[in-house]
């Protein structure tokens, strides 16, 4: 039973870790972190098989490019904007897009720009081209939701100023997985909530240590994850932290800019995408016949988090500790 328990826990963490992208240690600027475009060592098993990055996807990435904004902390956020040419106009929706743990801003890249939506797609700290967040022990307190929300607000202020967007114009926020947690916390923050029109958290965990949840409700989340911030005797916290570190490190494979490689992208596609897609055959047939979408799925995982502590901080902050702001205080519409 002990073997089954530990093996199951490891498998659970590895499912989350499989979204880890390849990294270079430490901070990187636009010139340092690498973009892979193929050709692949083995074709991606879609229909038809993909042998290199889709040309339209590469074109769109080049079109949107990326920018950098320096926060008050001296850390930098890397982002791109896309869509409507004038976001200050009435009828144009301004949308902040937050990626999941292990991915990056280009998971939100569109085949063609929206005409009436202005996207702001950012690498959260520790991902893509953005700076590392504080990483002490990889715990939730290293970089809290309060820290994260404050720097995202700085980004919004900068973009509003750059594009002459009226300060009274509200914006939308969408986020996936751990990015969904950030989305929820932005709407719950008293200093920000009045600037937000609505939010759309996608596939995000809840604030499991919120006082409104019962002990029985918390049990729906694996104890080895939810208790990994605990130092109490027999809580499983030390085991959880060990498994977090083990899982994160097992997925970190340093990038070498002078080496032609794809790091088994075909196997990655099968293990992450084909084995966990949900839905049914009709949806798969549409997605896997679209080279743009397949390329985006693959590319979204590279280069990803900068190191193991970035990943564990992200996971422990969202899944194992009380959040900075109470989601019960959200007043804007939520599209879950």
Image: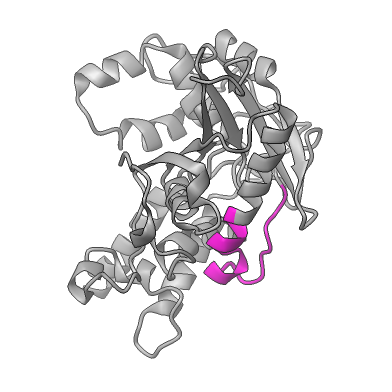
- For the point 44% across and 19% down, the residue is 293
Q: Quadrant of the C terminus?
A: top left
Q: Position of residue 175 (x, y in %)?
A: 45, 41
Q: Specify start and end residues of the magenta stretch as a single range.
A: 131-149
Please identify the quarter of the rendering in which residue 106 is found: top right
Q: Is residue 174 visible?
A: no
Q: Position of residue 111 (x, y in %)?
A: 50, 13
Foreground: 253 or 55? Answer: 55
Please identify the quarter of the rendering in which residue 176 is found: top left
- For the point 50% across and 24% down, the residue is 296
Does 311 appear above or below 228? above
Does 71 appear above or below 321? above
Q: Position of residue 134 (x, y in %)?
A: 68, 63
- For the point 22% across and 76% down, the residue is 215
The tally of labels here is 0
Is residue 280 found left or right of 260 in the rendered image?
left
How is colour applied across the structure in the image? one colour
């Amino acid at each position: 039973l002990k073997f089954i328990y530990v093996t199951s826990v490891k498998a659970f963490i590895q499912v989350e870790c499989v979204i880890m992208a390849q990294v270079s240690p430490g901070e990187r600027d636009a010139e340092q972190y690498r973009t892979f475009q193929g050709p692949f060592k083995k074709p991606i098993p879609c229909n038809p098989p993909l042998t290199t990055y889709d040309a339209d996807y590469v074109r769109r990435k080049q079109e949107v490019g990326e920018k950098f904004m320096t926060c008050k902390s001296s850390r930098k956020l890397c982002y791109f904007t896309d869509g409507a040419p004038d976001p200050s106009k009435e009828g144009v929706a301004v949308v902040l897009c937050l990626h999941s743990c292990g991915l990056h801003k280009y998971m939100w890249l569109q085949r063609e720009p929206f005409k009436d939506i202005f996207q702001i797609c950012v690498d959260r700290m520790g991902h893509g081209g953005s700076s590392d967040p504080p990483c002490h022990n990889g715990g939730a307190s290293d970089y809290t939701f309060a820290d994260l929300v404050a720097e995202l607000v700085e980004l919004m202020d900068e973009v509003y100023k750059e594009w002459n967007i009226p300060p009274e114009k509200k914006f939308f926020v969408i986020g996936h997985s751990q990015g969904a947690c950030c989305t929820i916390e932005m709407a719950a923050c008293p200093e920000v909530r009045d600037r937000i029109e609505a939010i759309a958290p996608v596939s995000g965990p809840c604030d499991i240590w919120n006082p409104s949840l019962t002990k029985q409700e918390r049990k729906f989340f694996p104890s080895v994850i939810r208790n990994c911030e605990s130092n109490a005797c027999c809580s499983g916290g030390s085991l959880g932290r060990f498994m977090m570190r083990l899982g994160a490190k097992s997925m970190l494979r340093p990038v070498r800019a002078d080496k032609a490689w794809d790091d088994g992208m075909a196997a990655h596609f099968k293990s992450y995408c084909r084995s966990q897609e949900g839905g049914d055959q009709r949806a798969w047939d549409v997605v896997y016949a679209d080279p743009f979408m397949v390329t985006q799925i693959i590319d979204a995982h590279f280069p990803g988090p900068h190191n193991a502590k970035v990943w564990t901080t992200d996971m422990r902050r969202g899944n194992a500790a009380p959040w900075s702001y109470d989601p019960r205080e959200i007043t804007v519409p939520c599209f879950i």
